Image (cartoon, helix red, strand yellow):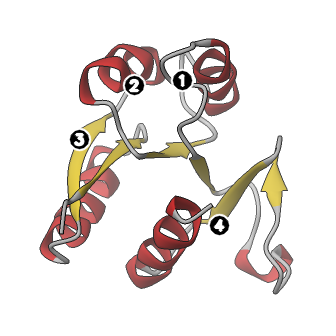
Amino acid sequence: MDKKRILLVDDEAALTRSLGMYLEATGKFEIRAVNRGGEAIRVAREFKPHLVRLDLMMPEVDGTEVAERMKADPELTAVPIVFLTALVKKSEVGADGSDIGGHPFLAKPVDPEKVVECIERNLRR
């Protein structure tokens, strides 16, 4: 089985480090992490991720801008994006899921198992 490449973009280095280690430990994913939105497009072009897990609120370049840049880039336009945000509480997310700008999202704090489920579901789309 080929590992799926997942790009984690979040300004919280501890979160990208711990989530990255968890995802890699499943044996299903190869992880690259960046902690600044401004680096996301460059790294995505190099890494060629199957999916990007993207924080919504980051200094300098926020997640919505990164998503817009990805969708405008012919190399990245088809890459699924899953937002992770503290702006919405888990209790506000419906059972059928929700989206931000057409992209699914998870509310912080998030159970790493839920991240795996969400990644797998969105890779099948």
Q: Which is in the foreground here, disc 3 or disc 4?
A: 3
**Residue type, mark 1 in image:** Pro
Q: Are marks 1 and 3 in contact (CB under 8 Å)?
A: no
Q: Residues within 10 Å of mark 3 (few under 14, many from 20)?
A: some
Q: Taking 81 as reference, is 88 above or below it? A: below
Q: In the rendered structure, which disc, 1 or 3, sits on the residue that comes first in sequence?
A: 3
Q: In the rendered structure, which disc, 3 or 4, sits on the residue that comes first in sequence?
A: 3
Q: Taking 93 as reference, is 9 above or below it? A: above
Q: In the rendered structure, which disc, 4 or 1, sits on the residue that comes first in sequence?
A: 1
Rendering coords of residue 115 (x, y %): 47, 71
Q: Nearer the viewer, residue 28 or 99?
A: 28
Q: Which is in the foreground here, disc 3 or disc 2?
A: 3
The residue that label 2 is drawn on is 36
**Residue type, mark 2 in image:** Arg
The label on residue 2 is none
Q: Are marks 3 and 2 in contact (CB under 8 Å)?
A: no
The residue that label 4 is drawn on is 107
Q: CA distance from mark 3 to mark 4?
A: 21 Å
Q: Nearer the viewer, residue 45 or 59?
A: 45
The residue that label 3 is drawn on is 32
In the rendered image, the quadrant that contains the N terminus is bottom left
The residue that label 1 is drawn on is 59
Q: Which is in the foreground here, disc 2 or disc 1?
A: 2
**Residue type, mark 3 in image:** Arg
Rendering coords of residue 73 (x, y %): 57, 13
Point 25% across, 29% down: residue: 47
Q: Are marks 2 and 1 in contact (CB under 8 Å)?
A: yes
